[in-house]
Amino acid sequence: MPRPFTLPDLGEGLTEAEIRKVLVREGDVIREDAPLLEVETDKATVEIPSPMSGRIEKIHVRPDQTVKVGDVLVTFADAAAPAGKESPATLDPTRRLAPTPETVVDGGRARQVGAQATSAAAGSAAPSAPARGVAVGGPVPATPATRRLARELGVDLHTVRATGRGGRVTDDDVRAAAGAPTDARVAARAPGDAAERAAESAREPRAAARPLASVGMEPPPLPKFEQWGPIERQPLSHLRRTIADRMTLAATVIPHVTHFDRADITDLDAVIRRNLEAAREQGVTLTLTAFLLKAAALALKAHPQFNASLDAAAGELIVKHYVHLGVAVATERGLIVPALRDVDRKPLLAVARELGALAARVREGKATLDDLRGSTFTITNIGALGGTGAIPIINYPEVAILGVARAREEAVVRDGQIVPRLLLPLSLTFDHRVADGADGARFASDIVRRLERPEHLLLDL
């Protein structure tokens, strides 16, 4: 009988995704773990691998379509059905087909696992070290990101010892099997024929636009704009809808207040210029943003109420004893905020190196879900784009965000003399429920003080 494959649980409470690319055609015969679809979630663009081997009988989705967890994506033909045309990922004729996956609930989450498979041929040997909780020959319980990592590291998931809940293979399990460090970040590769199929998919009709989530007061109906001239309706992308929903949520539930300040970064700019080439020789691009991250991280240790989240229902402030800083990165698809972890514990050059690599992954569309979650405080630097200042919206559920504009040389009185100094405009926007204006002013002043003493940042003082 036909075997349907549904959108699996992507973790982090994600309930839907938008189809970006369909990487197979009806009739293709593919292997288990071969790239099947590319989807965009609220967090990142991820590749969905095939959970089984077999022939694609029907594709139920198309690019730009939004699907929910549990929706059928593709249907595989009966294991006994004749094979159709071969694809670049042609099925190995000696490999047995996976059994129909079953949906089980583990820890409140639904996931698909395979039933115990029978041997395809008498006397065939089982793997020497089967993963704990994994049915030999069936689909290995693992998230799409973990499957992708396994392909990149050349690891067969059937041979990995699983340590996750319910026998699920985790990223660390895969890295351990490959001998890679647990904090390694592996860039994703697109399938060879993805561009061709993406072009073909682009010719298909776009999915209908969907309304944004309703938060708070309902807006009045819009007028009929066409009565004044021609108009065009353009559906929002999944990422733009997500940004719109989150910004509406943050602006609605958080009482924002903004404190403005300026930092004299003349000395800091000189430090960057003096060490630019030396840092480049070490493979590091030294930027103002790296110093901003380090200054903010150290200031957050002294002002922990800004490194927190508010549990309004419980009436509690959740103070985090780790500092993972979000950095707003502008991409062609929209603004994405990846997170640098433990910035307070790392030397400045390490922060600069990780920042460059992380921003590159985001702009290339290769960021993982882990790259995009867990931030405790966000910095958005629009200095490269100009402007004299901005009031950013807090990245919910954080309680504060630092906005940075373009530094400008201005005439300043120092020791009775008018001298040119490079001044950097800063704006600290925070949740007025968790901090008062005086608290915000002290926190901003702490960041300014650290930026004006760059040698202390280099020494983590």
Image (cartoon, rainbow, N blue to C red):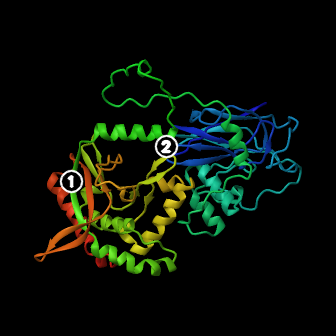
Q: Is residue 151 left or right of residue 256?
A: right
Choose top left, top right, bottom left or bottom right for residue 155. bottom right
Q: Which of these two is toward me, 416 or 73?
A: 416
Q: Which of these two is toward me, 420 or 204?
A: 420
Q: Residue at x 21, y 53 (%)?
A: 259
Amino acid type at image mark 2:
Asp
Residue 113 visible in this rendered orientation of the protein: yes
**Circle 2 residue:** 42
The C terminus is located in which quarter? bottom left
Q: Position of residue 340 (x, y in %)?
A: 43, 62
Q: Is residue 257 left or right of residue 116?
A: left
Q: Helix, strand or loop at disc 2?
A: loop
Residue 130 visible in this rendered orientation of the protein: no
Q: Position of residue 218 (x, y in %)?
A: 33, 25
Q: Earlier in the sequence, mark 2 or mark 1?
A: 2
**Circle 1 residue:** 259
